[in-house]
Every structure is written in C-alpha cells, then in structure tokens.
Image (tube, rainbow, N blue to C red):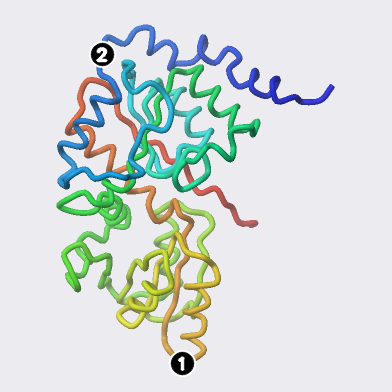
Amino acid sequence: MGFTRRKFCQLAGTSLLAASPLARAQGHSGSTLTAREVVARIKKNVGVPWHTPTADEFKIGDPDAPITGITTTFMSTLDLLERSAADGNNFVITHEPTFWSAADVVSDVRDDPLYDYKVNFIEKNKMVVWRFHDHWHAHRPADGIFTGWNKAMEWESYASPVANPFSHEYVIPETSFEDLARDMQKKLDVRSMRLVGDPKLKVTRVGHAGHYIQQCMQLLPRVDTLIVFECREWEAAEYVRDAIAAGQKKALIQLPHEGGEEAGMDECARWLKTLVTEVPIKFIPSGDPFWMPA
C-alpha cells in the first residue's frame, strides 16, 4: 500500500498533542498573554517606526490565543517546531521563512504533502509563527542581527566606525586567513564554511558584504577578507577569485546563512526578555543544514 498524502498528514499529528510538553503547558499555564500582545510590545520598543508592507507578519496560527512560551530562532524548520513544542513553547518568532519562499507564499505549495504535514503539526500543537526580519535588522540603536553576531564572535570592540555607526566592518588583531576561518567556524558553530584565498594570508580588516555583487565590489577594496552568507555562487566567490588572480591579496569566507544571522536571534531572545516576563523565552538554533565529510 502506498504512502498516501492523507496518511502522511495523519501521521504528523498522531498523539503529539496529548503527550507533548507543549500540551501539558497549554493545560496548566496561568498566563493569558497572546502572541499579538507580544508583537505589540515589540513594535513599541524596536526603536523605529513600524512600516508596511513588511515580511514581519503572522504566518500561521491564532495570534489571539494564550501562549505558553516563546522560541526565537533563525529558521522555523519542522525540526525546530518539534523542539519548540517539546520545550513547551507554542509561539515561534522566526527570522526567516516558514514555507520555503522569501514571502512565505503558500499558493504554490498548498497541494504539497510536506506542506500539509508541517501545517498539521502546527495546528495540532496550537502553535503560532511570526516572522521578525525587517524590523529586527532595522532595530535601533543597532541592527539586532549583527549585535548578536558581534557578541558571538567577541568582536564588539573591533567594529570599525567607517562609513556609519552601523557599519559591519572590523579591524581585528592580525591573524592568518586560515586561523580566522577556524575561529569563526568554532564560535558560530557551523559545519559548512567555504573559503576562497591563501590560507596564510595575513588578515586585519574584515567586512560583511551584502547579498549582491555590487555590495561586494564596493567593500572589497577596504578589507582583506569578505564575509558573505546569502550570496549567489557565481558572484562574490568568483569576483574574489579573479581579484586574487589579478594580484590582489584578498580572501572570502562564505558562511551558511545560519552562520551569518543565527546569533542575532539569540540576541533577540535576550532583548525580548526585557519586554516579556509572563512566559518562558528561549533561543533554539535551527542549525547549519549542511555537513562536510570527514
């Protein structure tokens, strides 16, 4: 007998609500705090006017139902949702999408069995998912994502004031490119970092480039090493490779997306605890999805 879509969806919810810590938390929580009320506090305290249109919206679930706990994360993967439910947290604040597209457009995936499976899990466990992307980057006095990244790397004191006070450029103690990469891999807990350049290159100036080749081109003259984590492979890596071939002493670190931004959602949990005291708040990493053979 085949594994039908209906069977696939049924398995998602079997016994989960009755047995999970989330179900017990929902049955015994005395809090009446809702996800919508939490978001209202975020809007009031994020430090910039709330603008629309924005990606920062409720993606699924009832925002007016009481919540039992809050999870902040980089990506609301199915595994992350399961771990959040196991911890008793039914409100997930995610930096990136839930349904595999930049704007969480579900019209193209509504008939997909994996979409049904994920939705069924969320509904069975009475979870709510809200995205916090645009305004967390816009947070003042500083971008929340890079505040967390700087803390994870222990680079707060190395941030360069060049260009503007929110610059993501750094002047670090001299090190080799290889040692820089190893330190970054360890502190950010990533498995799939990729490198372009001479391992022995001496590095003191490092900068985060943006998503696009124009941003990489503008930054490269000011730094020894570019860091990218949301970049098309035929752009930044090939540009830096050509720069090296032309005689420039440059290098590039291409992190997985999580390596560039996940620490910022750990920072989000710390910040949110100053606004919300009624329910537990926990950062749960979604983690690097890639791995490298030994």
Mark 1 to mark 2: distance in Å?
A: 63 Å
Residue 175 position (above or below residue 47): below
Q: Amino acid at mark 1?
A: Gly
Q: Amino acid at mark 2?
A: Thr
Residue at (34% x, 66% y) in the render = 208
Residue 133 position (above or below residue 37): below
Q: Which residue is mark 2?
A: 32
Quarter of the picture containing the N terminus is top right
| In-front residue for pair 179/94 | 94
Residue 153, percent from left and from top: 32, 57
Per the image, label 2 sits on a secondary structure element best described as loop
Q: Is residue 98 left or right of residue 42?
A: right
Asked if residue 203 shows in the view, the reply is no
N-term mark: 1 or 2:
2
Q: Which mark is residue 247?
A: 1
In the picture as drawn, the residue positioned furthest to the bottom comes out as 247
